[in-house]
Image (cartoon, rainbow, N blue to C red):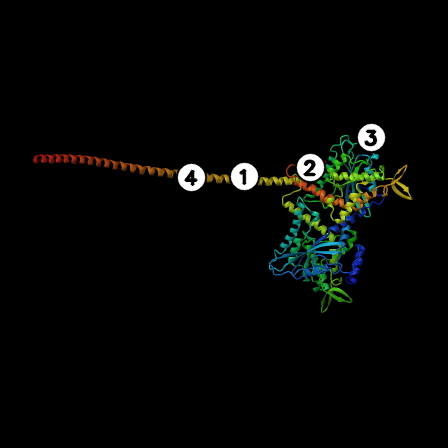
Amino acid sequence: PHAGPVESKNEAAMSELVPEPRQKPVVPMKPMGINTSLLGYIGIDTIIEQMRKKTMKTGFDFNIMVVGQSGLGKSTLVNTLFKSQVSRKSSGWNREEKIPKTVEIKAIGHVIEEGGVKMKLTVIDTPGFGDQINNENCWEPIEKYINEQYEKFLKEEVNIARKKRIPDTRVHCCLYFISPTGHSLRPLDLEFMKHLSKVVNIIPVIAKADTMTLEEKTEFKQRVRKELEVNGIEFYPQKEFDEDLEDKTENDKIRQESMPFAVVGSDKEYQVNGKRVLGRKTPWGIIEVENLNHCEFALLRDFVIRTHLQDLKEVTHNIHYETYRAKRLNDNGGLPPMTVETEENHESNL
Amino acid sequence: QGEGCRTVPLSGHVGFDSLPDQLVNKSVNHGFCFNILCVGETGLGKSTLMDTLFNTKFEGDTASHSQPGVQLKSSTYDLQESNVNLKLTIVSTVGFGDQINKEDSYKPIVEFIDAQFEAYLQEELKIKRVLHNYHDTRIHACLYFIAPTGHSLKSLDLVTMKKLDSKVNIIPIIAKSDAISKSELTKFKIKITSELVSNGVQIYQFPTDDESVAEINGTMNAHLPFAVIGSTEELKIGNKMMKARQYPWGTVQVENEAHCDFVKLREMLIRVNMEDLREQTHTRHYELYRRCKLEEMGFKDTDPDSKPFSLQETYEAKRNEFLGELQKKEEAMRQMFVQRVKEKEAELKEAEKELHEKFDRLKKLHQDEKKKLEDKKKSLDDEVNAFKQRKTAAELLQSQAQQAGGSQTLKRDKERK
């Protein structure tokens, strides 16, 4: 029960500035905790609004890495995911450009805004991965890059005078593109995922899924899932990080049925049934990218962006980064060679 | 944000505008914590105000006021409203201002606040740490209760607030303000504010950088310090039940803004700035503590040549230093040991020497004795021999004499015959 007119006047004034998210209850709250019973509305739940406003002001960082052989449609997919030209497409390359001799890491950042929410999106491309004749250890530059970002963050974190907000360049999500052979995973795929699933969140994705029929797709997905399991590869969302039963049931469904997502990407629009849709036009029909009957792009998008984006960042920060940090701080004595290189690079870049 | 990055337009709805919701949902699942410290003299109504603010009767026996020195009493409560779980910790001073000599009264408070920072720092420095599940005990807001004298701040107040202003967000409030009349109150507030300013005390300013709250926060900043009244008793006023205090001359309504600033305090503390208080504690006060503590421990960000140290190097240096000290200690111990052994050896040698000497002495003595005895024996033997000789001679003489006598006897016998 509230106090009288004075209170409601104040609340009316407040509601112009701080929109109350939910109805104030008329009955007293249920008593909780140590011998306390609340006899009226206090306003503790406004902290949600306060927090929301603060986060909107500071904005978000998101760093996504795409790995896969050239020609699997990585850049197109990222552009489709974020509905903007955030990734340079290989078809835009001058075809005389040679395929890089080693794996290169290219990180490009853009700022995108939607609904008042500002996001600094960094797409990390890995041209040259799996394109050589001898691809031994081609994941090493990638692993090195990921660890370098953790190192950068750690260095900032241990400073005496630290920045208010440490710039986050750590890779939050790595989309691994599987070639739609229809048979099984390639040894390179297994090797990469085995090594990298320990340091970063890997989301395996079946690229160019419009080359498979529905049955082929289902079979292929099952086989891939089985192979991943047999090889002990924990892709995101990892079973061990499910926080509660709700998470577990939701994630189990994704892990066992939907993943790996079989996707098709496109940045061209066509007219279908009177609507403009993103799609690929073929002589036998138009593949609608966002149509769940055609491919699982929408599932991937919802999964990565609309429901699990914050979780991807948190797992990266609370688990992968902490593992790196603990290992780093435990190493006493000799500096690992990677660090020395980083420091040298750092100095030379100053 | 966006340094060197260009903004790219979106050609459709992507869906990341749900990000704040995702973040908030995670925080809600996790729960929030808020820690308030109430500093004030005995009897200023700290516990009552807390009860009034949070609309509940917090359990807790009234503190015994017979302890010497200032103590801090802390209690944690779980509150829930809608789907928000709040772990509220209320820390109160007990016996503040009761002493005759109040020079050290502020110390337990400063130590307590530092201890919470220290605990957080320790966790942050651990190798295996669980920061996201850590129960944050750092004080987010300090309500400083000013006695309603109507004149000015007490020197204890000034000293204490000066010591606390760089460690915690201070919100000064005038307690039991139903003891002051309206006109006196205005003068009192002005006096307090000017005293705080002239003494350089930094109290918490409600943030005015966000347009949506800038206006209200700005207005509220001008009303500081809030004059509050606390009461958990509900009285019927008109046809509603309200928190109030009844006097013979009238009834003071707690939530009536014309009577006191309680509503303002609640708005500012809980409904508008709770998150900002938490953030300021973490990014300003805690960082300052951390910086000072690490510098104290000898860590630096740059060495004398202004090249950035890496933590690795600092650790290495410290470790080597430590190992060096350890080695020195070991050496010292070893030296001492060697010394002791030498000493003992010398002692033993001394003892041995003594024993030898003793032995020699005894031996000599023994030999002397032996010689003496032998000499004696010899002389005795000589005597014996001499005696024997005399005896033999005497016997011989006797036998001769006997023979002669015997032969005489024989002669006599013959003659007779």
Q: Are marks 1 and 4 on the same chain?
A: yes
Which of the 4 image quadrants contains residue B2?
Answer: top right
* Chain of the residue under the numbered disc 3 shown in the image: A
Distance from the alpha carbon under mark 1 to that under mark 4: 28 Å
- Please report contact status of discs 4 and 3: CB closer than 8 Å, yes or no: no
Q: Are marks 1 and 3 on the same chain?
A: no
Residue B94's disc is: none
- Give the mark toward the camera: 1 or 4: 4
Residue type at mark 2: give it.
Thr
Element on which disc 3 rests = loop
Distance from the alpha carbon under mark 1 to that under mark 3: 70 Å
Residue B331's disc is: 1
* Chain of the residue under the numbered disc 2 shown in the image: A
- Residue linked to disc 3: A96
Mark before the other along the chain sequence, 1 or 4? 1
Distance from the alpha carbon under mark 4 to that under mark 3: 97 Å
**The C terminus of chain B: image quadrant:** top left
Q: Is residue A349 visible?
A: yes
In this orientation, which residue lies closer to the viewer: A345 or B369? B369
Residue A339's disc is: 2
